Amino acid sequence: MWPLTNWNTHTTIPLLAVLFTGLCCLTQAITITAPEYSLIKSVQEDVLISVGIACSETPTIEWTFMSSSSRRDVAVWQPGVHSNISEYYEDRLKTHNNGSITLLDLRLADSGVYILTVSEPTGHSKGSTIILKVTEVLYEDLQYLAVFVTVLGGIAGFLMLSMWLLDKVYRRVKTWRQMRKQPEHDETELQPL
Ligand SMILES: *[C@@H]1O[C@H](CO)[C@@H](O)[C@H](O)[C@H]1NC(C)=O
Ligand SMILES: *[C@@H]1O[C@H](CO)[C@@H](O)[C@H](O)[C@H]1NC(C)=O
């Protein structure tokens, strides 16, 4: 009996080791999470393109921008090691250790797809995409609306005043004619004016 049990433990331990290594390899895979995969912002606002990266080694994080009319590099960095922000975004981009980026002073041309690639020195890599839509500033529209309403109000006011004046003139003419027709009538009759 003993030799058999011994043989069993000798083979079980390496087998378990192989299984564990396999599990470790699986858990080593990079995971990327994002609270929002599409964002809408106004011109001149700031945006945090937020992601969370989990991986076992220091990753290389790379963001690329793509829209129907252009494609450009945004930034490449290794948290705590080095960072390279492309010239186009130099003064208005911040990188965060968790892989997120903050883009300041948004322009309409920032509308598009932001592609994230995370790679580990071992060669593993994973990607994700986030869509950003930048819209015109709302208050400009409101200003136009306010001007439009003011102009309309002005026209309406002018029309009302004209009608009131015309009515007055008409009444005066009418009473004046009545006075001419019946000069003997009393003045009190003219009061409805
Ligand atoms: C990533 O880091 C930034 C800045 O510290 C933080 O505001 C953001 O919430 C983080 N995102 C996630 C998904 O953890
Ligand atoms: C930074 O990236 C640009 C291209 O986006 C490249 O030409 C340049 O050599 C890089 N600089 C460093 C220090 O890696």
Image: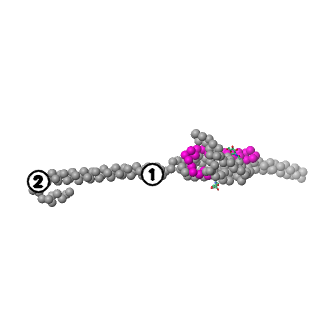
**Disc 2/disc 1 C-alpha distance (Å):** 58 Å
Residue 91 seen in render: yes
82 or 60: nearer the viewer: 82
Residue 71 as seen in the image, left or right of residue 4: left
Who comes first in sequence, dot 2 or dot 1? 1
The residue wearing badge 2 is 182
Label 1 element class: helix
Label 2 element class: loop
> Is ligand 1 within 8 Å of the beta carbon of the residue shown at mark 1?
no
> Which residue is at 70% across, 45% downward?
125
Extreme residue toward the bottom, this view: 188
Extreme residue toward the top, this view: 69
- At label 2, the amino acid type is Gln
Residue 128 seen in render: no
The disc at residue 66 is none
> Which residue is at 38% across, 50% downward?
151
- Label 2 crowding class (10 Å Cα cut-off): few <14, some 14-19, many 20+? few
Q: Which residues are magenta?
A: 102-127
* Residue 109 is covered by the magenta coloring: yes
Find residue 163 and report its horizontal and vertical position in percent: 27, 51
187 or 59: nearer the viewer: 187
- At label 1, the amino acid type is Gln
The disc at residue 143 is 1
Residue 193 as seen in the image, left or right of residue 95: left
Extreme residue toward the left, this view: 184
**Quadrant location of the C terminus?**
bottom left
Residue 161 position (above or below residue 65): below
Find residue 43 and report its horizontal and vertical position in percent: 54, 49
Q: Quadrant of ligand 2?
A: top right
The number of numbered badges drawn on the structure is 2
